[in-house]
Structure formats: C-alpha cells, structure tokens
Amino acid sequence: MRPIQMVDLNQQYLNIKNEVDTAMLSVLNSSLFIGGPQVYTFAKSLSQYLDIKHVIPCANGTDALQIAMMALGLQPGDEVITPSFTYIATTEVMALLRLKPVFVDVDKSTFCIDPAAIKKAITPKTKAIVPVHLYGHAADMEAIRAIAREHDLFVIEDNAQAIGSDYFFSNNTQIKTGTIGTIGCTSFFPSKNLGCYGDGGAMFTNDDALAEKLKMVANHGQKIRYYHDIVGCNSRLDAIQAAVLNVKLPLLDKYIAARTIVADRYDAAFKNNPRITTPYRADYCSHVFHQYTLILENDNDAAGYRDGLHKFLEENAVPSMIYYPVPAHRQKMFEAFGGGDYELPVTDWLTQRVISLPIHTEMDDDQQDYIIEKVLEYINR
Ligand SMILES: *Cc1c(COP(=O)(O)O)cnc(C)c1O
C-alpha cells in the first residue's frame, strides 16, 4: 500500500506529467512569464466552464477576496457579515482593509453561514455578506441572495473550496457556485480541487463595470499603463501556473467525480455509527468534497475524543486534519475587532467535533479500507 496522504499531489502529477511538462516547457521557451496566451486562455476557459462573463486571474485566493472588497468600494468601518467558521483568509482581508467583520454562526449540518443569523446581524452599516462554501458544500445562496436583494448588500462568495459545485435554485435554474453573488473568489493553491503548482487565484463576475474595476485594482489601479486612477495592488497569476491550470481544468469534473466516489465509500462505512455524523448533502447543491469532514459525538469531552482519533490515526500512519482548530472570532488577530464578544454556539460546538479524513483524486480502495478500519477501530474500542 502506498503511504496515505491528505492530498496525493505527486501521484496526481505523475498521471498528467507529460501534458504538464509540455505546457510548462512551452512557457519557458516563450519567455512570456507574466500575462501572455496561457493566462488569457485559462481565464477564457474558466469563464466558459463557470458560464460567467468575466474571470479575472490574480495571485492567490486571499488577494481575490481583498481585491473584491476594494473594487466594491468598501470603506473603513463598513460592516461585512461573515462566518467565523472558515479559513482565516476570508476574514483577515476585512481587518486589513479596516472593514468590520461581523461574525455570525453557521448551520450545523452544512457547516456554512446561517441565513437566519445573517438577518439578525444586519445594521444600517452593513455593506456586504461573504458566504463561504466550506469543504465543497454550498451555503444556502437562495436565501442569502434574497436577503442581499432586500437590504441592497453585495455578496462576495468565497468559492475557494467549492469550485465546480452546481447550485440548484427552487425555480429549477442551475448555476455554478461562485457565479451567484456580486463577485465570486477562488484559490488555486495546490491542494484545492483545481490547484496549480504554486499560488494562484481568480475573481468572477457578470458585471462589466465591476470586471474593469477588479482588473484595475489587481493591476496598480491602472487601465492605461502608468496612469494610476485608484489605489490598487499587484496581483497576477503567472503564466507557468496558468499553463498547469490549462491542463487541469478539463479534468476538474473527473476529479470531482473521483472525490465523490471516495466520499460515498466513507459514507457507506460510517453511516450507521451513532458516534459519527457523515457530511450532509443538501438537495440545493452538488458537494465537491474538497474535504470529507466528520462530526464526532461523545457525551463528555467531545474535543478530547476527537483529538484522540486524530492522534490514533497519526500513530497508524493515517493523516487527518482539524479544519479549523480556532474559529476566527476566537483568534487573537480579532481581539481589537471585538472577536471575544461574539457568542457563536454552533461554531464552537463544531470546532470541538470536526475531523477531516484524507480525500483526493488518486485514493486506492486498499488505502481507504485501511483508513476506515482504523477510524472504526478507535470508535468501537
Ligand atoms: C484556501 C482558501 C482561501 C485562500 O486562498 P489562498 O490562495 O491560500 O490565498 C480563502 N478562503 C478559503 C475558504 C480557502 O479555503
């Protein structure tokens, strides 16, 4: 059995080595390292895949979120409603821009921002909502879009973990996550479902004027070279990363299918266990399983029980991860933003109980059987 990894990037590379090497070499031979046809082609292909008018590539997913907030003209003190149960990048950029992150609770089954909690958090200063499609499962965008329309708020979707997920509205329309709100943001960090071999990110929108603004902000605030109209930054996807993404984008649906097979096998193995809750899949979206995250139930000391499984798996050469051990509102970073004042019981409850198991596109059945065996060995002992 090959060693088990959370994500087996090497095995995935070996399966597409010829195509990736050729694409990378073509960039080296062209010496077009910044911009150029690879970046242009990728942006175009991704906009076709997502069925959205504009894809603006940038340097990473964190930049994508920051540039989105800058392009929307959010000002210091503006309130932005966000889950606390997310990767730090989502909320960090708000602090960086001196916006006020307003942390709200998540839904216990989807792990995503709770629309009822959003409603309660709206004030006259609220300007935007940032839902995160955590672990590859979409937030309840139909409800969130309705709230945003009613209160005239921007919606910035953090789609870093859910690229490729389909969203089904009750009127039977179907679109990709990340194309529902005002702006969608994503990351091409290597371990993401569509990952490059370094850093990368992108923003999506259907709004022509906003697309121009996003491009300007990402490019030193200029539309015409050396004429800088607004304050921007320098955030680019480089050509080598775009070349990798041009090879991998056509494989994304296949990769999602491979992840789903792994998720289905885990589900079947764990579904009847009273101590384990397998990931919920709402009817309104297709789960793309960036992570396969269990909730562990134990009468007392839930966190200790969960941490015990993490340690037991580690001792048996099975990696697992706690995404994330500290929610944003409990991070020191946010003390000055009143982080400690929030009461988010579902977020705290989940933080003590979640554990993510290895899931990737190259998982062998014998590897997965071993992981399942070890999880059940711990749970049933
Ligand atoms: C990965 C990730 C980001 C940030 O992406 P980077 O490319 O690492 O900057 C933002 N939000 C979420 C939810 C992520 O998972």
Image (cartoon, rainbow, N blue to C red):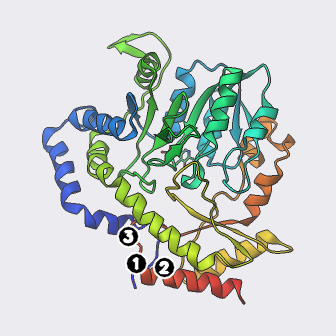
Give the residue at the far bottom of this rendering.
Answer: 381
Q: Which residue position holds label 2? A: 368
Q: Residue 119, position in %: x, y?
A: 77, 33
Residues at marks 1 and 2, CA–CA distance in whole angstroms = 6 Å
Q: Which residue position holds label 1? A: 364
Query: Which of 222/7 is in front?
Result: 7
Do tag 1 and tag 2 residues touch (Cβ < 8 Å)?
yes
Q: Amino acid at mark 3?
A: Glu
- Looking at the rendered structure, the secondary structure element under dot 3 is loop
Do tag 3 and tag 1 residues touch (Cβ < 8 Å)?
yes
- Looking at the rendered structure, the secondary structure element under dot 2 is helix
Residues at marks 3 and 1, CA–CA distance in whole angstroms = 6 Å
From the viewer's perspective, is 347 left or right of 200? right
Q: Earlier in the sequence, mark 2 or mark 3?
A: 3
Crowding near the residue tagged with mark 3, few <14, some 14–19, many ≥20 C-alpha atoms within 10 Å:
some
Q: Amino acid at mark 1?
A: Asp
Query: Which of 106/245 is in front?
Result: 106
Query: Which of 209/17 is in front?
Result: 209
| Above or below, 115 relative to 128 | below
Q: Which residue position holds label 3? A: 362
| Above or below, 65 relative to 287 | above
Give the number of callouts: 3
Give the residue at the far front of this rendering.
Answer: 171
Q: Is mark 2 within 8 Å of ligand 1?
A: no
Quadrant of the image occupied by residue 276: bottom right
Residue at position x 28%, y 49% in the image:
244
Residue at position x 64%, y 88% in the image:
377
